[in-house]
Image (cartoon, rainbow, N blue to C red):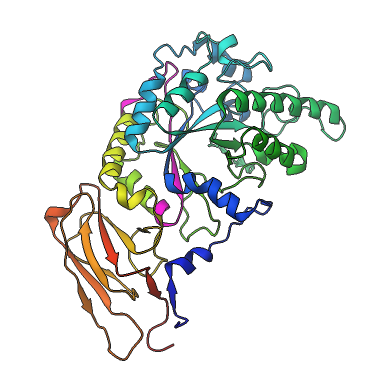
Amino acid sequence: MNKLIVTGAILLQLVQPVLAQQKTDPQEINEKMQWFADAKLGIFIHWGIYAVNGIDESWSFHNRKISHADYMKQLKGFTAKNYDPQAWADLIKESGARYAVITTKHHDGVALWDTKFGKLDVAKATPAKRDLLTPFFAAIRKNGIKAGAYYSLLDWTNNNYPGFLKDSSRYDIKKDPARWQNFLDFNNGQMTEIATRFNPDLWWFDGDWERSADEWKATDVRKMLLSHNPKTIINGRLTGYGDYDTPEQNFPVVRPNFHWWELCMTINNNWGYQPQDTNWKTPYEVITIFADAISNGGNMLLDIGPKEDGTIPPQQVNVLKELGKWNKKHEAAIFSTIGGLPQGHFYGPTTMSKDSSAIYLFLAGKVSGQVMIKGLDNKIQSIKVVGNGTSLTHKIVGKISWSPVPGLVYIPVPENVQDEYMTVLEVKLDKAAKLYRGKGGLN
Ligand code: H79
């Protein structure tokens, strides 16, 4: 084989899982991660008492924008009175998402279920007066969607947790290890409740950065969660003892070199409901960001922030519905695909079928004229507009008979086949993609 030609299968092998502490058998972990790799889109839900005033979740008191006492007064205003978990699950289904992750407890320590550990939960301390998670997990699963639990390891309200306000500490855990152990027992108790009652398909930890893996006893936490459900997936924020990486609000430019990753992102500028924040991402922006994530082999976890009463603001509903329309039309190019061509072959996002014999080209904006693929050393069997079925022609340009360098593939895209957001083309190849990655000429 010419060393400058690589096949799709080889490209895949070059991607290394890098979450360093992973000791699981690679075959086993691949099987466990399969649904996540195929899922592509998740919906993140930040729901908590911070929606009452519409202020930053937990950070507002931590950063001294509001006193802790005033922050906690929001407990009295959290009603969940129009909460319709089935409507939430139906909207999430309509968005095309294959998984959903809900805040069971944020850094403020307010649990969304009736925990036996401590007094701070929505059943005991708010007018909502009930466990809000059981009906959520049930509705999500009824709709065939995987259900994940966000859980903040740190808890700035708990008196046995050292951190509280910015630049302050309650105590030094080295001087009082028993008090720290007390906190760990509390966390373990809550996590065991979540594991037993909701059996999450995925654990989304947050707030690990304040303590080390040793202090969190991260290996024990991992072991404990897997003993409840060996198939549960854990995000990387268990101080590295998770299964996948989680860039937050920051878009990778080069393809991340970890095997599984997920971009979590707000729908405006904030995680929770904040009425003054009207900086909504448009459906076009969300769709193009999503295409970019899956092109680079990742998922997107798109956040929504319901109001305290459980209603989802109409702008959020609109984005999820528009995204859902586009997902439905382009399903074949998105779900159960793998990351696409390495950069340089096509100026735009791409994905591939698992055997890499089909390449999907995502065309941002309105295209007028031709798009082009470089370095593709295959015969093209057909080109179709996804979700529309129109066949397109192509022309090979600049192929030199004696050279191993493939010609350029030019594809004219008529205006009348174009999607309102992002048109997708399916390029079917004779066999697995073979890519020329050289510098031109013979070397
Ligand atoms: O729940 C949402 C946010 O509230 C929470 N994660 C999402 C999903 C979150 N927000 N910020 N962060 C997590 C990370 C915060 C990082 C920082 Fe820092 C805190 C930057 C500066 C202070 C950690 C500590 C990094 C440097 C110091």
Is 298 covered by the magenta stretch? yes
Q: Which residues are magenta?
A: 293-314
Is 39 covered by the magenta stretch? no
Q: Foreground residue, 179 or 281?
A: 179
Location of ligand 1 given as a quarter of the image: top right
Q: Quadrant location of residue 98?
A: top left
**Residue projecting furthest to the bottom:** 402
Instruction: Tell me what residue is drawn at x 42 percent, y 51 percent.
Output: 293
Q: Position of residue 141 (x, y in %)?
A: 44, 28
Q: Quadrant location of residue 104?
A: top right
Is residue 69 positioned above or below 46 on the image? above
Q: Quadrant location of residue 374?
A: bottom left
Is residue 414 positioned above or below 119 on the image? below
Q: Position of residue 53 (x, y in %)?
A: 48, 19
Instruction: Tell me what residue is drawn at x 49 percent, y 63 percent.
Output: 12
Q: Position of residue 381 (x, y in %)?
A: 24, 68
Q: Give the quarter of the figure containing the N terminus.
A: bottom left
